[in-house]
Amino acid sequence: MDMMQPKLQSKVVPTTCGMCYIGCSIKVQVENGVVVAIEETLEASELPPMVEATLDQRFPGWQIVLAEKLTDEGVVTYNLEIRHSGRKTKVLLDAEGNELKR
């Protein structure tokens, strides 16, 4: 008997909301019909206070170039691209503002 694994159906679905229809910068990762991850572009003002506090403390004077909220299997992280004096770096923070990766 030939045991074959079912083929994983994975795709990213860009979304549009019912309010603007122009695309809200939300991408949904769907695998076999189940949402497994969500990527959302945010304004700096939409970041949680703990994330803002970490940025202010560890990166004073740096500006946010890109802020993304990532939800992967229920775990929320924030992927940030920041710059200061011509230098850019990326930092990954959890919802409590703990630095996970730079």
Image (cartoon, helix red, strand yellow):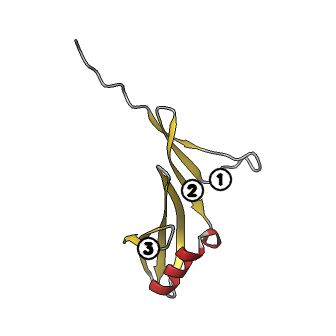
- Which residue type carries mark 1? Cys
Residue 8 horizontal side relative to residue 76, left or right: left
Quadrant position of the N terminus in the picture: top left
Q: Position of residue 35 (x, y in %)?
A: 52, 41
Task: Indicate the amino acid at tag 2.
Answer: Glu
Horizontally, is 60 left or right of 26 in the view?
left
Which mark sits nearer the N-terminus, 1 or 2? 1
* Res 6 → quadrant: top left
- Residue ID for mark 1: 24
Disc 1 to disc 3: CB gap under 8 Å:
no
Of 82 and 48, the residue lying toward us: 48
Disc 1 or 3, which lies upstream in sequence? 1
Instruction: State the SS at label 2.
Output: strand
Residue at the far top in the pictured view: 1
The reply to whether dot 1 and dot 2 touch (C-beta < 8 Å) is yes
Marks 1 and 3, how far apart at CA: 27 Å
Q: Nearer the viewer, mark 1 or mark 3?
A: 3
Give the class, few, some or many, for how many residues have Cα within 10 Å of label 3's Cα (few <14, many ≥20).
few
Disc 1 on helix, strand or loop? loop
Compare residues 12 and 56 and report the one nearer the observer: 56
Badge 3 marks a residue whose secondary structure is: loop
Task: Indicate whether 13 appears above or below 43.
Answer: above
Q: CA distance from mark 3 to mark 2?
A: 19 Å
Quick check: 88 left or right of 33? left
Tag of residue 98: 3
Residue 91 visible in the picture: yes
Residue 22, how many percent across, how many down? 70, 49
Nearer to us: label 1 or label 2 = 2
Residue at the image position 53 percent from the left and 74 percent from the top? 51
Q: Which mark is residue 40?
A: 2
What residue is shown at x 59% (from left), y 70% (from top)? Answer: 47
* Dot 3 or dot 2, earlier in sequence: 2
